Amino acid sequence: MRIETLRHKLRALGAGPLHEQRVLRLWSQALPQDSGRRRIADFLPRALREALPALELELAGLARLASAHPAADGSERLLVQLADGQTVESVLLPHGGLCVSTQVGCAVGCVFCMTGKSGLLRQLGGAEIVAQVALARRRRPVGKVVFMGMGEPAHNLDNVLEAIELLGTVGNVGHKNLVFSTVGDMRAFERLPQGRVRPALALSLHTTRADLRERLLPRAPRIAPDELVEQGERYARATGYPIQYQWTLLEGINDGDDELDGIARLLHGKYAVLNMIPYNAVDGLAFRRPSWERAAAIARQLHRRGVLTKLRQSAGQDVEGGCGQLRARVQGGGAQ
Ligand code: SF4
């Protein structure tokens, strides 16, 4: 369901702008109906009030919890079942973050990613994206939403932007705490600055070499790393939020001195943070993660060369930590 369709439905039931906001707030923030001095529903027009229980049931059905998998680091991986039986993953991160999926499967086909192996199965509607947040909020508070789960948000731009607008207005998430994560797409660079809610931006860089990037991300738009960083810098200056460059560290592939030189050349002096994430091994794929010591030495070296670098573990590593692995195992379609 598109959020616009939901809004139409509310208006057809007599909702004015304030009623519409109230219902969307109730849903996206997973508020109990009796919050405040009186039931929120008491302030709605009669037709809407009467239709509300059925509508809430329909919205709850957009994303149901199939299973929850807590990890030692405080994160919790959720397998979420959509109304048509498809499943996606959301991850509750430590410190109030939530990573949501934007597509079932993904067309970019990154060679190191389990989700990429399936190709794109279908888009998620904007309401299905927000429904993941509402579902997660029934387990714990969520103050930050990163669009970094299954799928490429730029390939489902209208729905993702609708979800961002809702979360950044009535959904109680600060604009810079909404993080649009993409491999880089000119349509996203054009549309994001125009939105009423401008999210922070994470760009998957992974290499500074255009030829290697084409091999690692075979169906990503052909944007050379230099151009990607140029576009990122423009957005960072326009919004005032640093770009988060993502770098999945693959042993023997993108952890050499040539890449460190390339990173220093591209990112020195930029309004940026480089997140280095040692690869989370997937059975059946040949890629390996470098040792933590090697990764830490790389991060130290980049720091010395003026690149703000954070070394991170991917959340919930002990529970099928790579994106798409849990879904693949549960559906029996993957290498687990
Ligand atoms: Fe798609 Fe992200 Fe996986 Fe690449 S890493 S295939 S963009 S889900």
Image: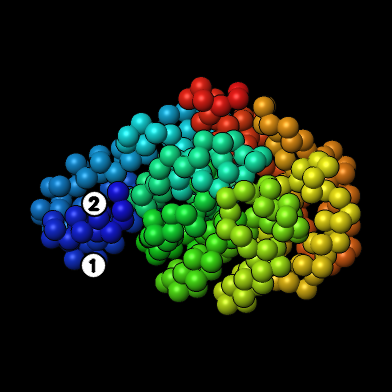
Image quarter of residue 231? bottom right
Colouring scheme applied when the structure was drawn: rainbow
Q: Return the disc, 1 or 2, that comes first in the chain's sequence.
A: 1
- Quarter of the image with the C terminus in it: top right
Check disc 1 and report its element: helix, strand or loop: helix
Q: Give the percent coordinates (x, y) of residue 74.
A: 62, 38
Q: Is residue 191 above or below residue 86?
A: below
The residue drawn where x is 68% and y is 47% is 216
Q: Amino acid at mark 1?
A: Pro
Judge from the rendering whether residue 272 lies leftward or rightward of residue 239; answer left or right. Answer: right
Check disc 2 and report its element: helix, strand or loop: loop
Q: Amino acid at mark 2?
A: Arg
Query: How many numbered circles are shown?
Result: 2
Whole-number angstrom distance, CA of label 1 to CA of label 2: 19 Å
The residue under label 2 is: 39
Q: Give the percent coordinates (x, y) of residue 49.
A: 15, 51
Give me the disc on residue 17. 1
Judge from the rendering whether residue 232 lies leftward or rightward of residue 297; answer left or right. Answer: left
Q: Is residue 307 above or below residue 129?
A: below
Q: Is residue 183 above or below residue 285?
A: below
